Image: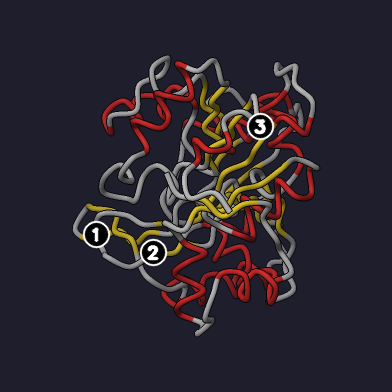
């Protein structure tokens, strides 16, 4: 198996790169990514950042630039599940009421006809914001879903559907060395309670349609590169494109935490198999 993404450059025309755990480790660029991405762009490859982040694209591009990833130099375009959610909300003409769970996001609803309410009892659905706790006026990440379980049980009793615009279970952020929970963990807990969740983002096909709508390349020339089996790799596999799993992020941490001796063994256990194992 190749040990560097550049060994695959002649096999593919389009590289879909996840952000967290692939090119960004929560604090810094993953070593080698800036040089590799620039080489792909200079080599005429289409490099698309495909993120389960809930930022709008313009906000995401600004965040990337602050991290050292420059559009036109290191990548061609950014696609986020937040942008897909924004477009879907904006096109929906139903005058629905929504309640925001966790850290709220006004940007995704600014062009919709939805109305935000302050009590879940008045809502038609719940939007899952970033699962953080407000402490002294500052939103802070947490490591488990436990602080939110009481509220989620209340929402389940109200039988409210939840909308999740970031299916990732975990991500690395500056506050901790270990991964913090993300919206996918909240959604999974709610589904385990018997609740209904609607998703935007990987592994679901709509995000790949959204990312590739202007791309004229056969499926066999498109590669999805990610660090998470359940979203990046499963999503690419289900969509019918090739996949590469990096050994720099969530899948490797889960493998080690669950006591598997190798990534091949772990992939076999989950029945999610990437076409390649790579590093940058």
Instruction: Identify the residue position indicated by label 2 in the image.
Output: 180
- Mark seen at residue 11: 3
Q: Quadrant of the C terminus?
A: top left
Instruction: Identify the residue position indicated by label 1 in the image.
Output: 175
Q: Secondary structure at mark 2?
A: strand
Q: Nearer the viewer, residue 120 or 11?
A: 11
Residue 28: x and y, percent?
26, 45
Disc 3 versus disc 1: nearer the observer:
3
Residue at x 74% of width, y 69% of height: 271
Residue 97: x and y, percent?
65, 43
**In contact (CB < 8 Å): disc 1 and disc 2:** yes
Q: Secondary structure at mark 3?
A: loop
Mark 2, other Cα within 10 Å: few <14 / some 14–19 / many ≥20: many
**In contact (CB < 8 Å): disc 3 and disc 2:** no
Disc 3 versus disc 2: nearer the observer:
3
Q: CA distance from mark 3 to mark 2?
A: 35 Å
Q: Nearer the viewer, residue 112 or 191?
A: 191
Residue 46: x and y, percent?
57, 21
């Amino acid at each position: 198996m190749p040990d560097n993404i550049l060994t695959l450059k002649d096999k593919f025309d389009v590289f879909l790169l996840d952000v967290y755990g692939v090119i960004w480790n929560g604090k810094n660029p993953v070593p080698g990514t800036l040089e590799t991405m620039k080489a792909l762009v200079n080599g005429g490859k289409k490099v698309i950042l495909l993120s389960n982040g809930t930022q709008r694209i313009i906000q995401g591009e600004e965040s990337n630039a602050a991290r050292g990833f420059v559009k036109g130099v290191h990548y061609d375009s950014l696609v986020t599940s937040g942008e897909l959610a924004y477009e879907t909300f904006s096109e929906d003409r139903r005058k629905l009421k929504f309640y925001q769970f966790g850290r709220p996001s006004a940007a995704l609803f600014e062009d919709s006809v939805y109305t935000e309410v302050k009590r879940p009892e008045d809502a038609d659905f719940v939007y899952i914001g970033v699962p953080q706790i407000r402490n002294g006026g500052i939103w802070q990440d947490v490591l488990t879903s436990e602080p939110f379980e009481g509220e989620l049980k209340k929402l389940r009793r109200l039988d409210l559907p939840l909308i999740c615009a970031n299916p990732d279970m975990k991500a690395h952020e500056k506050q901790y060395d270990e991964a913090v929970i993300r919206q996918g963990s909240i959604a999974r807990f709610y589904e385990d309670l018997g609740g209904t969740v609607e998703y935007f983002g990987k592994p679901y096909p709509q995000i790949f349609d959204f990312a590739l709508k202007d791309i004229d390349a056969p499926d066999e020339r498109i590669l999805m590169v990610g660090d998470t089996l359940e979203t990046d790799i499963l999503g690419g596999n289900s969509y019918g494109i090739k996949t590469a799993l990096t050994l720099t992020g969530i899948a490797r941490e889960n493998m080690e935490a669950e006591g598997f001796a190798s990534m091949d063994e772990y992939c076999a256990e989950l029945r999610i198999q990437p076409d390649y194992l790579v590093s940058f």
